[in-house]
Image (cartoon, helix red, strand yellow):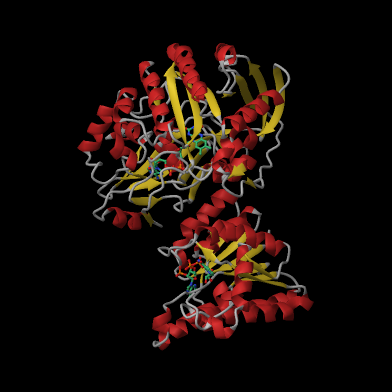
């Protein structure tokens, strides 16, 4: 992973212990399970929250689950899928903590219907710089709520949360896969299937010319067959770092080609279990090793709907011309933005891809940033290690309000990440 | 369903083990010093797994209390798992009898005294299992921690004898050597990542091995090889080494 830094790690068992940690005269940043790709959870002193992971209560009547913030989404699934409950919002990995889900205000394949993670939060408890613990909901303290959801750990340590789960009647998903020929068709297909609860597309971002933007759109919905026996699967692990050359242009192309051509029909239907549908990468532990020892980084942007076609065409062209391939390119139609100061989604298309870290990459990404800004889009802080302060500020018009909030509550003296310093958040 | 008794239940490894057994449908007795501190954890398990969890006070060095402790359990446990341990401070234990005594009693005599009681019950019932957590430190004494190591070695010998003794009664005894585990015992130590297990890893491996009636396990299999090598180094050479 990138960057690699040495740091001091603090752990706590209870609130008092945490209180005496943050009373020390240092800066801290909370760290969940480290699944953010960027530097938002990194600094010299990190507070490791994952071991703070008790389940507190569950109400069968309304699906309200209360947990400490170190609980992993996967632990919730393990306990509650067999009882017919699922997360209202989940990202593409289940190995993140509740704290990380709130702090990044994560979005899933149903964002166009259900919005971000903050939608399912009844309230959370957070420790502020003076050690005080505050219970916060959108109704009671809207400012703190909107700053914390998406605030990437910069408003305090989230200790626990009450989140609503939703009822499901199967662990299986009825999936429809639609093969598209180019970007325009991909967009049209997203719109055509707008009503499907879950949707996402894999794009072959090395395809050129008239094929640019071709891919597979996958939409899905839970089945209702009462099959709920959910168990952890054995993982396939990539045992060693691939030599750096392995992921050259040709191997990426071969991968995209295989994936795309495996599906023969224009429209096909599959039944897949929820792990396959939501968490394809979790099945391969250490999958990042495929990128060699130098590691990789991820780039995720979103453009308003009106500018998506034009902007993404430019972005795809820049990428395919550069030959710096992506193992994964994921396109997703998002719904309306929310009021949180630093949440990422807006109504439009989000696009995420991986890059192997190599010479010339950073200047390529600077060029992509420019296109994103020109088209009034933004990049996702959870995935960022390198963008400029200027590109960041233009993408997040509420940054000034967030900065003022931090200043007013003296949050900047206690909570800083490498990212917040780099971008002056 | 059957109860599992976990002693030293506040240890990070024990907690992961408790969750693992509850996940597989067992009810739990959690025994520890200052056991009231386990209330939130007991709640955690019952929210996760909907199992019954009972909390019991036990100081493993309070030998006289052990009989009563076991007698008070209305339904006797199917399995007993000991995670009690105390690393102590080696240099202190070399001069201070109380530290020496504490290490030996916590890691060996206390556990042996309680397991004697459990074992005799299981032997009569001709059913059940015992799991003891020892340490690779007991495989060979090293200058850094040979007092802890020798107490763990004693527990290892005790468990292998017990295994032998209870075999005929159909009672199984398993010895677990975790290697390095990231817990509060090792917090702040700079442990090599590849050799270090998480408490959850220990729990999964322990549960599976116990169900399969394994006798002696290392949590990460590299440790089997490491200790095989450590054990064959001749003593004349070992004594000069700084490991
Ligand atoms: C394979 C994969 C797929 C992904 N898919 C998606 C996706 O579909 N949608 C999406 O939105 N994201 C996605 N992500 C990103 C991921 O969901 C977020 O980065 C998430 O925040 C990681 O959570 P974590 O617990 O690992 O936290 P970390 O990475 O450790 O921290 C993330 C941020 O949360 C803060 N934080 C953590 N815990 C607390 C706390 N208790 N209190 C306050 N702040 C805290 C940290 O300071 C940091 O700023 C994906 C990541 C991976 C690896
Ligand atoms: N972590 C490792 O790397 C490692 C490696 C090899 C073996 N082990 C062994 O694994 C087991 C669990 O260790 P751990 O890492 O989880 O460390 P731990 O948290 O320190 O566990 C030790 C437990 O023993 C309990 N204990 C100590 N004295 C006691 C007494 N007199 N009566 C009752 N309980 C007592 C402690 O209770 P309190 O909470 O009340 O102090 C604590 O819960 C131990 O046997 C340890 O030796 C650990």
Q: Going by the image, does A399 lie left or right of A182?
A: left
Which one is nearer the viewer's eye here, B70 or A391? A391
Is residue A94 visible in the rendered image? The answer is no
> Could you tell me residue B208's position as x and y percent?
68, 59
> Could you tell me residue A213's position as x and y percent?
56, 17
Is residue B149 visible in the rendered image? The answer is yes
Quarter that holds the N terminus of chain B: bottom right
Which one is nearer the viewer's eye here, B143 or A363? A363
Q: Is residue A279 above or below residue B13?
A: above
The single residue placed furthest to the right in the displayed view is: B168
Q: Residue at x 23, y 45 (%)?
A: A413
> Could you tell me residue B108's position as x and y percent?
55, 80
Q: Going by the image, does A337 lie left or right of A279?
A: left
Q: Residue at x 61, y 49 (%)?
A: A239
Q: Is residue A31 above or below residue B109?
A: above
Q: Residue at x 28, y 31 (%)?
A: A402
Q: Give the total number of marks visible in the rendering.
A: 0
Which one is nearer the viewer's eye here, B121 or B238? B238
Q: Residue at x 29, y 32 (%)?
A: A143
> Could you tell me residue B3's position as x and y percent?
64, 63
Which one is nearer the viewer's eye here, A387 or A90? A387
């Amino acid at each position: 992973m990138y960057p690699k830094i040495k740091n001091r790690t603090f752990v706590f068992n209870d609130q008092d212990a945490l209180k005496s940690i943050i009373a020390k005269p240092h800066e801290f940043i909370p760290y969940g399970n480290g699944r953010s790709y960027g530097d938002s959870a990194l600094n010299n002193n990190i507070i490791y929250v994952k071991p703070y992971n008790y389940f507190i209560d569950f109400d069968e009547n309304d699906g309200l689950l209360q947990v400490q913030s170190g609980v992993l989404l996967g632990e919730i699934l393990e306990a509650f899928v067999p009882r017919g409950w699922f997360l209202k919002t989940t990202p593409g990995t289940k190995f993140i903590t509740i704290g990380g889900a709130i702090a990044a205000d994560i979005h899933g394949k149903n964002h166009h219907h259900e919005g971000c993670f903050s939608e399912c939060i009844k309230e959370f408890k957070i420790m502020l710089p003076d050690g005080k613990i505050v219970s916060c909901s959108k109704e009671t303290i809207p400012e703190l709520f909107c700053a914390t959801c998406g605030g990437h750990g910069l408003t305090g340590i989230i200790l626990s949360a009450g989140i609503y789960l939703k009822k499901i009647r199967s662990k299986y998903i009825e999936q429809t896969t639609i093969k598209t020929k180019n970007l325009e068709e991909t967009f049209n297909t997203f719109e055509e299937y707008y009503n499907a609860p879950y949707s996402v597309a894999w794009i072959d971002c090395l395809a050129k010319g008239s094929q640019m933007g071709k891919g597979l759109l996958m939409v899905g919905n839970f089945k209702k067959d009462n099959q709920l026996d959910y168990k952890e699967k054995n993982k396939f692990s990539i045992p060693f770092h691939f030599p750096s050359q392995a992921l050259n242009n040709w191997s990426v192309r071969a991968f995209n080609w295989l994936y795309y051509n495996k599906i023969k029909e224009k429209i096909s239907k599959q039944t897949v279990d929820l792990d396959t549908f939501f968490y394809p990468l979790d099945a391969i532990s250490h999958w990042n090793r495929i990128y060699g020892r130098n590691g990789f980084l991820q780039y995720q942007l979103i453009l308003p709907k009106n500018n998506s076609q034009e902007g993404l065409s430019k972005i795809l062209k820049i990428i395919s011309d550069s030959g710096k391939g992506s193992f994964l390119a994921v396109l997703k139609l998002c719904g309306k933005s929310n009021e949180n100061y630093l949440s990422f989604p807006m109504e439009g298309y989000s696009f995420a891809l991986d890059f192997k870290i190599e010479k010339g990459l950073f200047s390529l990404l600077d060029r992509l940033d420019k296109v994103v800004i020109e088209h009034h889009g933004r990049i996702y802080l959870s995935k960022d290690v390198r963008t400029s302060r200027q590109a960041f500020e233009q993408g997040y018009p509420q940054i000034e309000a967030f900065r003022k909030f931090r200043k007013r509550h003296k949050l900047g003296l206690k909570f800083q990440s490498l990212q917040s310093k780099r971008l002056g958040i | 369903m059957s109860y599992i008794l976990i002693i030293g239940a506040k240890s990070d490894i024990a907690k992961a083990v408790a969750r693992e057994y509850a996940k597989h449908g067992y009810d739990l007795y959690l025994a520890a010093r200052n056991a009231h501190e386990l209330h939130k954890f007991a709640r955690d398990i019952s929210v996760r797994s909907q199992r019954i969890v009972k909390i019991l006070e036990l100081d493993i060095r309070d030998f006289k209390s052990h009989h009563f402790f076991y007698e008070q359990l209305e339904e006797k446990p199917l399995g007993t798992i000991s995670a009690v341990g105390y690393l102590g401070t080696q240099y202190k234990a070399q001069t201070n009898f109380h530290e020496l005594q504490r290490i030996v009693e916590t890691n060996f005599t206390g556990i042996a005294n309680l397991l004697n009681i459990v074992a005799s019950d299981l032997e009569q019932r001709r059913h059940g299992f015992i799991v003891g957590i020892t340490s690779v430190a007991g495989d060979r004494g090293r200058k850094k921690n040979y007092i802890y190591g020798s107490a763990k070695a004693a527990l290892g010998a005790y468990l292998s004898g017990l295994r032998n003794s209870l075999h005929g009664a159909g009672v199984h005894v398993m010895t677990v050597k975790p290697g390095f585990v990231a817990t509060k015992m090792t917090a702040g130590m700079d442990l090599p990542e590849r050799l270090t297990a998480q408490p959850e890893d220990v729990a999964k491996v322990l549960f599976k091995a116990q169900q399969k009636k394994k006798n002696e396990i290392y949590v990460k299999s590299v440790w089997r090889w490491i200790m095989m090598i450590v054990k064959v180094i001749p003593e004349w050479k070992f004594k000069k080494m700084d490991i």
